[in-house]
Amino acid sequence: MDLSIIIVSWRVRDLLRQCLRSIYQKTAGLQFEVFVVDNNSLDGTIELIKDEFPDVHLIVNPKNFGFAKANNQAIKLAAGRHILLLNPDTEFFDNALGRLVELMDKSKEWGIAGCRILNSDRTLQPSVRRFPGWFTQALILLKLHHLPPFKKFLRRYLASDFNYQSISEVEQVMGAFFAIRRETLDIVGLLDEKYFFWFEEVDYCRRAKNLDLKVIYTPEPAIIHHGAGSFRQLDWQKQIIWNHSLQHYFWLHGKRWQWFILWLLQPLSILLALLADLWRR
């Protein structure tokens, strides 16, 4: 088996249908399997898979287990030489998966790979970042990151100067298209299930880099990602989840004083998100 594709789904039936159709229509010359892990969507996703995509390996969860745990459920069953964690709001317009496997087979030093990601209108969607620093994350918690005095810190974190035209070793790639070599899984292990959502792929890249494995961006293949851009305004409930993941990341990879500062800022960040949510209503 060349490739195991794993898609975690939660209330995105129509986007998932579009994603799966593009996989089966555009992929050629490749032995692959597809897993869909549904986190209790209750939107007809189960019926969709059974009726329209009978070859998909379907895992149905009784509740929303989060992104990391749901991916791990499928990773444990996957038979591919390479594993692709794929968002359900992605779409293929050519044989991107065939090209991915070709590149990873040829480039044995690649531990993790991400590709060029395009918006729905096929403009570039930034998908490479540096590892998060405590100061930039504090600015984001306080909703100050877009103010002119602080934009330079955000630009560095977002790797705004990155050249998306060439293959490069990077610190982290976006989790919407996250390819992992089987040997990398054997060395690094599974995703950390203490991340419910957000930061799980950042953590995985950090763990891989700490073990001298390479994280690679490649301009080909390219895919469409219909999701939102960076830093969409979070409602207060999502802010709580994001904060928890941020805290766990810095507990593992930061210094204790950094973790403590970010912990102190959490209540204010939730209040700001709540006020913004009320304002939008």
Image (tube, grey):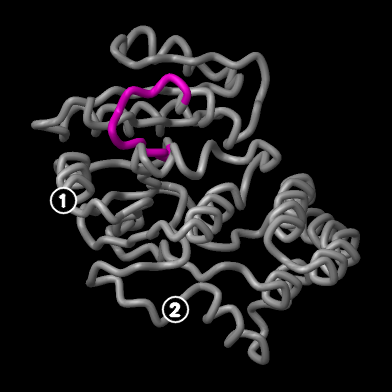
Expressed as whole percent of the image width and height from the top left, the position of residue 80 reads 30, 28
Is residue 120 in sight in this rendering?
no
Expressed as whole percent of the image width and height from the top left, the position of residue 43 reads 54, 19
**Amino acid found under the numbered disc labelled 1:** Lys
Is residue 226 in sight in this rendering?
yes
Q: Residue furthest left?
A: 29
Q: Are marks 2 and 1 in contact (CB under 8 Å)?
A: no
Q: Is residue 192 above or below residue 42?
A: below
Q: Quadrant of the N terminus?
A: top left
Left or right placement of residue 177 versus residue 279 in this view: left
Q: Is residue 254 above or below residue 9?
A: below
User: Label 2: how many residues lie within 10 Å, few (<14), some (14-19) or many (20+)?
Assistant: some
Q: Which label sits on residue 179?
A: none
**Amino acid found under the numbered disc labelled 2:** Ser
Q: Nearer the viewer, mark 2 or mark 1?
A: 1
Q: Residue at x 43, y 65 (%)?
A: 128
Left or right placement of residue 100 versus residue 209 in this view: left
Secondary structure found at label 1 = helix
Over which residues does the magenta segment extend? 76-87
Residue that label 1 marks: 106
Which sits in the foreground, 266 or 189?
189
Q: Is residue 95 above or below residue 149?
A: above
Residue that label 2 marks: 160
